């Protein structure tokens, strides 16, 4: 477990490439990938809840001509329960191998920030 401040913890399972929520509440979720430049295909970035295809957030962008890398982000605020897992998933439709690039030392990242208790009500 890795501490994220004020006694809150989050677990990152490198083998499963997911973050496990340790405390029920509202969270800010931010995923990012830097795509290498390619002039074909769409790129999609998703945040997945509990390994399901029911995504909590998604964002699609068009191609970016080479050689320019493209920074792609997806952001969501969600109510999550202890034990939920969040994954970052990236897809592309260029028809060729298209890897992530590197820009300012970044390639892909996922962050989870606790905002406070889950909102009461429906």
Image (cartoon, rainbow, N blue to C red):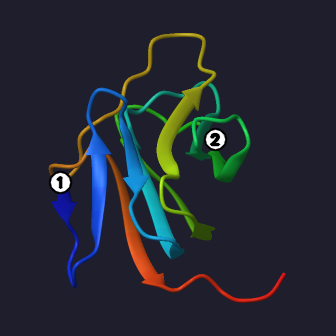
Q: How far from the left and from the top, in percent, is residue 74? A: 54, 58
Q: Secondary structure at mark 1?
A: loop
Q: How far from the left and from the top, in percent, is residue 100? A: 35, 32
Left or right: 53, with 70 as reference point: right
Q: Residues within 10 Å of mark 2 (few under 14, many from 20)?
A: some
The tag earlier along the polypeptide, 1 or 2, is: 2
Cα–Cα span, label 1 and label 2: 22 Å
Q: How far from the left and from the top, in percent, is residue 25? A: 52, 76
Q: Residues within 10 Å of mark 1 (few under 14, many from 20)?
A: few
Give the residue at mark 1.
104
User: What residue do we see at 41% from left, 33% from top?
Assistant: 37
User: What residue do we see at 17% from left, 59% from top?
Assistant: 2
Q: Which of the 4 image quadrants contains residue 111?
A: bottom left
Whether 56 is drawn above or below 77: the answer is: above
Give the residue at mark 2.
62
Quarter of the picture holding the N terminus: bottom left
Do the numbered discs 1 and 2 sit on residues whose CB atoms are within 8 Å?
Answer: no
Q: How far from the left and from the top, in percent, is residue 88? A: 47, 43
Foreground residue among 97 and 68: 97
Q: Which of the 4 image quadrants contains residue 53?
A: top right
Foreground residue among 2 and 28: 2
Left or right: 116, with 121 as reference point: left
Q: Secondary structure at mark 2?
A: loop
Foreground residue among 94 and 7: 7
Whether 2 is drawn above or below 40: the answer is: below
Left or right: 17, with 3 as reference point: right
Whether 25 is drawn above or below 30: the answer is: below
Residue 114 tag number: none
């Amino acid at each position: 477990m890795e501490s994220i401040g004020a006694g809150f913890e989050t677990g990152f399972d490198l083998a499963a490439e997911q973050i496990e929520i340790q405390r029920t509440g509202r969270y800010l979720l931010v995923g990012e990938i830097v795509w290498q430049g390619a002039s074909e295909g769409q790129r999609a970035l998703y945040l997945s809840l509990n390994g399901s295809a029911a995504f909590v957030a998604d964002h699609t962008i068009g191609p970016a001509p080479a050689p320019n890398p493209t920074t792609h982000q997806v952001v969501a605020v969600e109510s999550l329960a202890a034990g939920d897992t969040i994954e970052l998933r990236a897809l592309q439709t260029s028809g060729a191998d298209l890897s992530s690039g590197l820009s300012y030392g970044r390639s892909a990242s996922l962050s989870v920030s606790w905002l406070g208790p889950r909102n009461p009500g429906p």
